[in-house]
Image (cartoon, grey):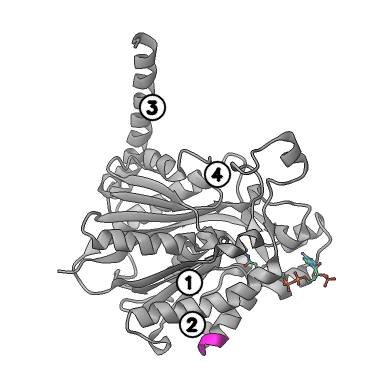
Amino acid sequence: MTVQAHIVGWGKYIPERVLTNDDLTHMVDTSDEWIRTRTGIVERHIVAEDESTATMAIEAAHEALEIATLRPTDLNLIIVATATPDHLFPATACLVQDALGATQAACFDLAAGCSGFVYGVGLAADLISTGNYVNALVIGAETLTRITDWDDRATCVLFGDGAGAVILQANGSDGGVLSSVLGADGSGGDLLYLPAGGSRQPASHQTVSEGLHYLKMKGREVFRFAVRAMPAATRLVLEKAGLTVEDLSLIIPHQANYRITDASAKALGISKDKVFSNVDRYGNTSAASIPIALCEAVEQDRIHRDDLVVFVGFGAGLTWAAAAVRWSAPLPTAPLTRRKKIWYALSYRYAALRSLVRRFVRWLVARFTRE
Ligand code: UT7
């Protein structure tokens, strides 16, 4: 029997604070008109001081678990796709695991820029098909505004923060993730990168004073790459699944610029209403953009059972990725009962307590034992 990976849970977290185009006109030499017409962005959300990639990822994971009605201990795998992890190590996925109490899960972060979430879905689906994993949580989460140069008008108007998650589950029935394609062209690495803070240029007073810990982008070249990569990856993933563009119900593309998604729709010969867009309200949230858009597409009744949905992304690396999914989860989802809500709240409290006890025991062992 072949095992397919089906999406059984999804969730998102958007920080509260909104930064509008008008707000940006007080910070750099730009205009609402320029930002809207060149990108489609109207506003974006920004993390609060006490929030981070991990805290947003955890919130999105809570929602996904509750929709899937799974226990955190049912998860065997957690992948966090991000370019803005809480730390270089430990992996943000481990922070998520600890907060959820997902004690049975293998965890790692995935760095594939804005394609990261789709890379994660493709990898998790392949791992599930081996029979070694049953429930995989794939999260895209970013705090891009923490690596944004707020004096650089070419980039600071583009990005926002947020997180989205899905749970993929092994199932013998047809549907779920039908195919995926993951690609890269490292020769374009310098088109979108963070110069300092890694082993090539460790953080120093000089790197900070030169602003080398802010992302740098050659926007026009990334744009040219994107309008080629998105339609090509979409066609390829459909071909791999034995399908064509005519079979498509909805494309959920990486949300970077409405001009890129419109050009992709044109290149594929499909109408714009088959391409989901919410870039106006969130800006570019990198690896988080596709799972956030997926959640909104579900909320807006744009996805139904048996629909063929394609996720397609492109980004730093350069990377690109697409996944074709036959939607199999029943919609609308049943609201959680009061009992279930209490159960989840208690289980997250228990996870926090468990973490505290384990830290305390480690401290005790270190204090009272000698090698
Ligand atoms: O998620 C993956 C990563 N990123 C992307 O997907 C981004 C892909 N690239 C893009 O979306 C577009 O290239 C941008 C939105 C970044 C830029 O749009 P563009 O149409 O390619 O503009 P441009 O870079 O060619 O700049 C056009 C003009 C320039 O002025 P001159 O040289 O023509 O006088 C810029 O200096 O617009 C100027 N400009 C701005 N003007 C007002 C650049 N940024 C701004 C700004 N406000 N914020």
Highlighted magenta segment, given as a residue range: 266-270
Q: Residues within 10 Å of mark 3 (few under 14, many from 20)?
A: few
Q: Any atom of ligand 1 within 8 Å of the CB at mark 4?
A: no
Q: Position of residue 138 (x, y in %)?
A: 39, 56
Picture residue at 54% right of the left edge, 61% below the top: 114
Q: Which residue is mark 4?
A: 52
Which residue in the protein does label 2 denote?
274
Between discs 1 and 2, the one toward the N terminus: 2
Mark 1 neighbour class, 10 Å CA radius: few under 14, some 14 to 19, many 20 or more: many
Quadrant of picture, ligand 1? bottom right
First in sequence: mark 2 or mark 4? 4
Q: Is residue 91 left or right of residue 212?
A: left
172 or 295: nearer the eye? Answer: 172
Q: Pointer 4: residues within 10 angstroms few (<14), some, or many (20+)?
A: many
The kind of residue tagged 2 is Lys
* Residue 356, numbered label: 3
Can residue 304 be seen here? yes
Q: Amino acid at mark 4?
A: Ser
* Cβ–Cβ under 8 Å for marks 2 and 4: no
